[in-house]
Image (spheres, rainbow, N blue to C red):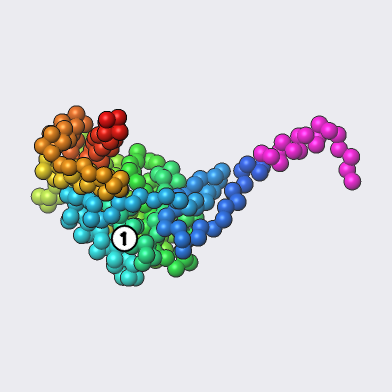
């Protein structure tokens, strides 16, 4: 055996410790039979799928003001589950209008039929090929969800997603669809100067190269699903539903009143937004405050 000096041994231990930190984390395979969703977690030069222990309980019936969007996405997801042609989807529009909630509600509805969801952060889209390899032989159908996605021009993850949607060597396997939510229709910031360079060809205006590039990614999604702010009537319907849901969950009576409606409207004015998220946030505030006052009484 080698008779190494203590300082050499200590140095080797430091080197081995550093190398160990770079190695992929030992993680158990996800048990998809009992786990409907997972997150991709980056670790050193790779990553692993981490089961999601608690998932959102939103149901399709609880989503108001997005009936047409639900119809399109339900149909597309059913086609996918049946092994029929289906499209990757871009859900875009105003913040808080139910884009992410719709995807989660689809999982809750179709998980018993074999649907699973993998959520991936923008920075981890460079690992798409590894994620695809991890699930391509599984007997389930996977939605790869990238939530609240926006890019800056030239980002590597932008190019990887573009390649995956384009059917290149990074394309998704047959049992994976890509659903993306974003506040931006084209996923990239748009500027006035983007339209400079457009020209007429045979009397028809052709987009500039800058706009062509910005549209090229979103154009690869077969479905564009738009989400818009609620009307006041639809917003009040959403608040009413949220209050009723809280009342049932807590086994209490929370009667609707004109005062409650007016307070909900004032809350939306303060937030400068009428949407499902605003309705949910108001409900948490109002129900919590009301029940605390009752307890104090």
The quarter of the displayed image where residue 149 is located: top left
Q: Is residue 43 left or right of residue 83?
A: right
**Foreground of the two, 100 or 288:** 288
Which of the 4 image quarters holds residue 254?
top left
The residue stretch that appears in magenta: 1-18
- Seen at 10% across and 50% down, the residue is 203
Above or below, 210 against 203 in this view is above
Q: Is residue 81 left or right of residue 273?
A: right
Q: Which residue is mark 1?
A: 109
Quadrant location of the C terminus? top left
For the point 57% across and 56% down, the residue is 28
Locate residue 235, reporting x and y percent. 16, 42
User: Does the magenta-highlighted stretch encompass residue 4?
Assistant: yes
Locate residue 173, reporting x and y percent.
Answer: 42, 63
- The majority secondary structure of the magenta stretch comes to helix
185 is higher (above) or lower (below) than 116: above
Q: Observer-nearest residue: 4 or 294?
A: 294
Asked whether residue 176 is drawn in magenta, I would say no
Inspect this view and state whether residue 8 appears: yes
Side of 287 where 161 appears, left or right: right
Which quadrant of the figure has residue 111? bottom left
Position of residue 51 measured from the top left corner of the image (x, y, whole percent)? 48, 52
Give the number of marks: 1
Residue at image x 40%, y 41%? Answer: 155
- Return the residue nearer the eye: 127 or 194: 127
Residue at 17%, 49% (x, y): give it: 65
Q: Residues within 10 Å of mark 1 (few under 14, many from 20)?
A: some
- Residue 229 visible in this rendered orientation of the protein: no
Q: Relative to 201, is 101 on the left or the right?
A: right
Q: Please tell me whether mark 1 sits on a helix, a strand or a loop.
A: helix
Q: Is residue 213 above or below residue 69?
A: above
């Amino acid at each position: 055996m080698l008779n190494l000096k203590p300082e050499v041994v200590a140095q080797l231990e430091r080197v081995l410790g550093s190398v160990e930190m770079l190695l992929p984390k030992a993680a158990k395979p996800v048990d998809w039979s009992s786990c409907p969703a997972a997150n991709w977690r980056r670790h050193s030069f790779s990553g692993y799928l981490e089961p999601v222990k608690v998932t959102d309980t939103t149901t399709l019936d609880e989503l108001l003001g997005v009936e047409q969007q639900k119809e399109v996405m339900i149909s597309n997801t059913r086609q996918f589950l049946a092994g029929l042609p289906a499209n990757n989807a871009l859900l875009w529009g105003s913040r808080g209008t139910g884009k992410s909630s719709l995807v989660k509600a689809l999982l809750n509805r179709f998980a018993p039929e074999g649907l699973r969801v993998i959520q991936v952060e923008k920075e981890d889209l460079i690992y798409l090929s590894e994620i695809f390899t991890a699930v391509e032989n599984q007997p389930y159908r996977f939605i790869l969800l990238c939530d609240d996605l926006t890019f800056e021009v030239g980002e590597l993850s932008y190019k990887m997603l573009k390649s995956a949607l384009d059917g290149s060597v990074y394309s998704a396997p047959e049992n994976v669809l890509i659903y993306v939510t974003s506040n931006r229709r084209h996923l990239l910031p748009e500027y006035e100067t983007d339209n400079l360079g457009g020209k007429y060809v045979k009397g028809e205006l052709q987009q500039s190269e800058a706009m062509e590039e910005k549209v090229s990614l979103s154009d690869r999604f077969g479905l564009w699903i738009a989400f818009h702010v609620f009307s006041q009537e639809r917003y009040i319907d959403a608040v009413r539903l949220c209050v009723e849901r809280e009342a049932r969950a807590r086994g209490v009576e929370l009667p609707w009143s004109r005062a409650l409606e007016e307070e909900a409207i004032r809350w939306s004015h303060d937030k400068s937004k009428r949407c499902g998220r605003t309705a949910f946030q108001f409900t948490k505030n109002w129900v919590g405050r009301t029940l605390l006052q009752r307890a104090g009484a």
